[in-house]
Image (cartoon, rainbow, N blue to C red):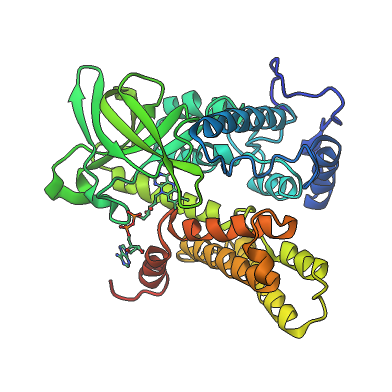
Amino acid sequence: MSHPSAPDPGTAADAPSLDGLEDAGSREEFTARVRAWFESTAPRKGSPEDFSAVHAVTATTLADYHAHERHALAVTRAWQRRLYDAGLAGRSWPADCGGLGAPAWQDEVVTEEQARFGVSTKMFAVALEMVPAVLFAHGTHEQRVAYLPPILRGEHGWCQLLSEPGAGSDLASASTRATPVDGGWSVTGQKVWTSNATSARYALLVARTGTKEEGRAGLSCFALDMEQPGVDVRPLRQMNGAYHFNEVFLDDVLVPAGGLIGRLGDGWAVLRTMLASERAAIGGGTSGRSATRLVALARRLGRADDPAARDLVARAVIRERTLDLLRARMAAGHEIAAAGPATKLLYSEHARHSADAAMTLLGMAGTVVDDPLAQEWIERLLFAPGLRLGGGTDEIQRNVIAERGLGLPR
Ligand SMILES: Cc1cc2nc3c(=O)[nH]c(=O)nc-3n(C[C@H](O)[C@H](O)[C@H](O)COP(=O)(O)OP(=O)(O)OC[C@H]3O[C@@H](n4cnc5c(N)ncnc54)[C@H](O)[C@@H]3O)c2cc1C
């Protein structure tokens, strides 16, 4: 079973056929066939063709940033298309949404196997992980069949237009306004910290359709076309000199009537679905997985038998294992209250502690940016604070775990 194919630059003739994959009798058999496909198709981690970190933009000039984004988008698109043609993209999605109607565990296997190789679809993280959750829960059939298949084919990336200068954790005070006009909505306002805004074709937008006093009840969610007049994307420079985020100014931008997701004034419910899937996706991410790399670092430094080094590494292995077990319980369908916030919190703490541990192991070498052993960890160290914020801060995750997970008062 594979998707109907179309001409595509990313498809190689030498990839092994996955015909009959739906007949793989067990998870083990399915995994073995998918792994064999990746082994003959995907570059190895660390090889010259490895593009698994290509989405983590470290360009230090604006021109470099735009060139990097173009390159990152091209390789990500080609790879996503290749997965699609092999029948490995969105296998569990319904056929009219571009999927194959297969069991959900098969998508998990593909994600797990893919993480072993030097490839990535992270530039499409919003499109692949948040948009489907939102549209399956709140979208119309027309929206699903219009927006989802181009995502699976690697044609359309998405971004999230949520945070504003005056509304981060407290998104209920968002003030970007959507006003009814002939044929839809006119949107005006400012968003900030938008990842991937320069490459996204569409955005999930939260905007005010009611009064400020209504708070969350005055918000609605929309699909906004990023390639139209009135959308002004301005990249922001970070403390490490690199670019990742953008400010997005919206000036009388049109969203057609069919772009309203969920009911008018129901934006908060849509937002909750979006944030829950984002937190689970961040918590299930692979880029911050660091235990294996820490073990390798301790060995390279000749510290594998040093009790102090072993203690640091063992703590990282235990944290990562705890995260894996929590994710496995979620995947097996166990009801775990506040599971998304819990995995996101564990993940961000793991990233931070592991980067700190690596710096302890490296000692003074950790201050030398072009030291080959230190480079990776310096990047991880500088990225770790961002993981505490994106998708909702650690404090907000703790609030949600306390209230929804433990039943404590607000
Ligand atoms: C890597 C990364 C990617 C991001 N990508 C996007 C994106 O694509 N789209 C987008 O819209 N946004 C994005 N963001 C923005 C992110 O969602 C916000 O930074 C985050 O929600 C926090 O908002 P804020 O920065 O305004 O901080 P604030 O909300 O002002 O918080 C400041 C501090 O106060 C604490 N605080 C606030 N409220 C409470 C409370 N009720 N209880 C306890 N403590 C509290 C916070 O934890 C924090 O420490 C991204 C951020 C990062 C770092």
- For residue 300, what is the image quadrant? bottom right
- The residue lying furthest to the top in this view is 7
Q: Nearer the viewer, residue 6 or 14?
A: 14
Q: Quadrant of the N terminus?
A: top right
> Residue 302, percent across and down?
83, 73
Q: Quadrant of the C terminus?
A: bottom left
Q: Residue at x 59, y 33 (%)?
A: 68
For the question of whether residue 317 can be seen, the reply is no
- The residue lying furthest to the bottom in this view is 307
Q: Nearer the viewer, residue 85 or 395?
A: 395
- For residue 3, what is the image quadrant? top right
> Residue 53, percent across and down?
65, 44
Q: Residue at x 67, y 72 (%)?
A: 363
Q: Residue at x 34, y 26 (%)?
A: 231
In the displayed structure, does residue 78 sit left or right of residue 397? right
For the question of whether residue 399 can be seen, the reply is yes
